[in-house]
Image (spheres, rainbow, N blue to C red):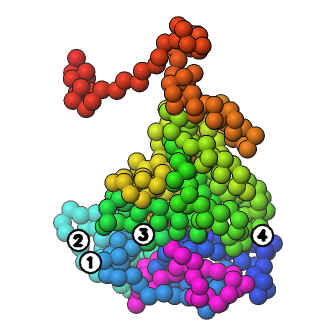
Amino acid sequence: MTPSDLPATPPDDSPADSATLVSIDPTWFGLHERLRTPALKQALADAGLVEGTHFRWEKAPPREELAPLVAAHLARAFQQVTASLRDTPEGVKAWEAALGELSRGLVGGQSAGPGSVADRPGSVADRPGSVGDRSGSVGAPAADRSPWRGLPEELPSLPFRQLLEVRPRAAGVVGLGQTPRPDLPLGVSALLTGSSRTPSLVSQIEKELASADRVDWLVSFIKWSGIRALKDALLRFVESDPAGWDVAPGASGSSGAPGAAGATGPRLRIATTSYLGATDIKAIEFLANLPRTEVRVSYDTHRTRLHAKAFLFHRRTGFGSGYVGSANVSRAALDEGLEWTAKISEHELPWLWRQLEASFASHWEDEEEFERVRPDDLDRLGAALAAEGRGGAGGLVQGWDEGGAGALPFFDLRPYGFQSEILEAI
């Protein structure tokens, strides 16, 4: 049973590590947060990665962090098994058999109780070599049909140890000068509240930029104060190459995103709007002039009025982070305000991560809605922002004269919460 989120054994034509003759899949390189298991140790060996050269095992996190980490790990292991049962021809019976086998195994071969799936005659739990059978190993030939046959290889080894980073040998001695990590675990989701009890969003974005392979932002407003706070981190990100970035040309990410390897597209993609004229033209000018960066703007402030705030940090290792909440890119929102932001772990919630990727792609790939902004387009954007800010062309009903006389202002009226309840009851 091979972990579904681990890179496959490298093909013969994959790029070789500079210090070995073994081809190494570059998607191994980067930050991880994996508990040590027999399956992981075998996968590292199969990939040609050497302990002490490319990686090292780190001590387990504190007890309060270990519990959710183990729970998330076991959930992924069980998810792989249940996914394999989804399309079986036996249907519900396959689920009953698998649960019966597991139940019998957990109670050491004893019945889990009258009426339980493990207590049914002919249960898969009775098969020689199954999880519930004590007469032979789980890997015995008789257990080849058991969906749990590889589960023991996925269970954490004791004492608990973690794989936190894999580096090319050329990057130096593993363990020295390690890549900065976000304060929140990569493998577990969390909530930032803008209070002193949680890290600030600006600090997490800075640390995410230090280790991400690609970055996507979808935000309503971008203020210069927010960009200024992140300026150095953004420059380091777009001017550096992650390990193995240029060693696998042609790779492509999900949702039509640029590949994690090879200079096939921008590493930083930012989508924003001209809504209310709140975005600072200076901020967009800085971003539009960054290398490996693409900025797109929605000028349609009446039909869409995008109000989303999402920051996605992609990692080839499968430990991406997404921050979705109420904070725009401003110093007050990122660092000082009581903004709530949900941090979503790709490793823990892969289905939600895929929804984030797809939602971003649906906006980014809509060329009628979001138009690319190059340095030469800043005059047009500046005019649109100014018009929005003063309620000018962006605030007029189509067909009326924009010259002043006869212009009809556009009012954006929204009911209060109690008014909404009254309107819904009418």
Q: Earlier in the sequence, mark 1 or mark 4?
A: 1
Residue at the spot of label 1: 107
Circle 3: element type: loop
Residue at the spot of label 2: 112
Q: Residues within 10 Å of mark 3 (few under 14, many from 20)?
A: some
Q: Earlier in the sequence, mark 2 or mark 1?
A: 1
Q: Nearer the viewer, mark 1 or mark 3?
A: 3
Q: Earlier in the sequence, mark 4 or mark 3?
A: 3
Marks 1/4: CA distance? Answer: 50 Å
Q: Earlier in the sequence, mark 3 or mark 2?
A: 2
Observer able to see residue 103:
yes
Is 296 displayed left or right of 355 in the figure?
Answer: right
What's the magenta region? 154-181
Task: Indicate the quadrant where residue 56 lies.
Answer: bottom right
Observer able to see residue 123:
no
- Residue type of the residue flagged with mark 2: Ala
- Residue type of the residue flagged with mark 4: Val
Residue at the spot of label 3: 184
Residue at the spot of label 4: 247
Q: Nearer the viewer, mark 1 or mark 4?
A: 4
Image quadrant where one finds the C terminus: top left
Picture layout, residue 117 above or below residue 142: above
Residue 156 located within the stretch drawn in magenta: yes
Residue 122 located within the stretch drawn in magenta: no
